Image (cartoon, rainbow, N blue to C red):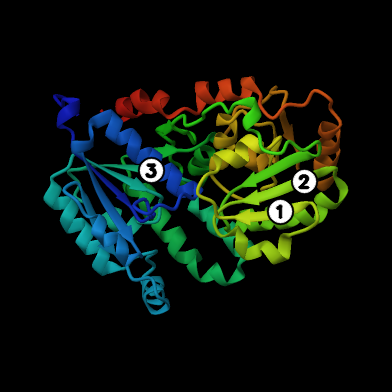
Amino acid sequence: MPGWRVNTIKIAYITSVEILDLTNTGGIQCCKRNLNLLQQAFGEDNVFICAITKNKKLLTKKTGNTEVFYSNRNKISILKNILTNRLQFGRDVEQSVLEHVNSLDCDIVFIEFSRMGFLQKSLSGKVKQVLFLHNIEKNYIKNQIRVHPSRAVLKKAFNINESMAVKYADKIICLNNRDAEQLEEIYNRKADLIIPITFDDSYISPAEESRQNPNPCLQLLFVGSLFPPNEHGITWFVNEVMPYVDAEFTVVGRDFEKLRDKLSRSNVNVVGSVDDLSVYYNNADAIVSPILIGDGMKVKTAEALMYGKPMFATDEALEGYTVEGQKNIYRCNTSEEFILEINKHAKESQRTGFDKNLRDLFLEKYHTPGYISVLKELLF
């Protein structure tokens, strides 16, 4: 777009993920990262947030640059949306968002997830549409149906919206090469850019004496919210691995307390929701990520690298991360592999809960500020 100056570009940022809430699931964290990147690249005054929410309390978050749209997601509303092949919001909300975006006279519309195909189809052809693919929804819904067969009613809507979203996007950003390859295979469309999961660096090195009640038993930690792939993986790990390893395992993450009775064992402590993860990361000897099904990238893998934590993880949990050759990254895809590697690590006399090489890898490849310039180049 010749003749533009960076400080004159206006961007409408559209999401139906609860970015205005305090909750921080992996998807929300990635959306907040994308918004942060846009604001750093083009200035906060030039980025206009269009947040679609199911929480009426968040309507109070409306400000000069933030417009909030309420989408009723009770069972009747969801059914009506499904009947029109829409996801998360219906025609009425869609129209309100379109009217607001048109009133902004923006140059770029940045859309999170390929679930708003109908909205993208109706956007003015004068604006450049930038689509951020958190995963390939066609595959995502297949995995969801495997765990929750009742979600098959959503399959058609997911497929229709993604097909339209890809068709009308001017630029597409993927999280990893796997998604980019699937995008080309399914839709014959190449990704314009890959931006992996990243974090702003919030790590503070703890004093050695701050580790509370050091335990000679290997301390394993899982961090993640309760949603189908995490529930599936942790249930499997607790039943198939933990009875056979010399270690203690702590599960931390939003809503996992709901499974405390189901998952707790003599060597398994289910904590669930917490306000501060840093204490748990700093007290852990290693992270476990037994994710067997999924899409996109796992946000908590980048967070573990930020803390320099050794990791026992499946190929799925490591998808998109460049960790080959790292001493303290253990790829495990079967119960036998997890048991072998964890017990071997537990016996190491010089084992450490912090690996500087892993933290350096985070700073090199998964630190948010490193992607400001590449995003600016794509959009400008």
**Residue 31 placement, left or right of 56:** right
Could you tell me the amino acid type at mark 1? Asn
Could you tell me the amino acid type at mark 3? Lys
Disc 3: which residue = 32
Q: Earlier along the polypeptide chain: callout 2 or callout 3? A: 3
Residue 142, x across and y down, in percent:
58, 59
- Element class at badge 1: strand
**Mark 1 → mark 2, Cα distance in angstroms:** 8 Å
Q: Residues within 10 Å of mark 1 (few under 14, many from 20)?
A: some
Q: Earlier along the polypeptide chain: callout 1 or callout 3? A: 3
Residue 124, x across and y down, in percent:
19, 50
Location of the C terminus by quadrant is top left
Name the one closer to the observer, 44 or 278. 278
Residue 30, above or below 92: above
Location of the N terminus by quadrant is top left
- Looking at the rendered image, the disc whose residue lies closer to the viewer, 2 or 3, is 2
As drawn, the label of residue 269 is: 1
- Element class at badge 2: strand
Disc 2: which residue = 248
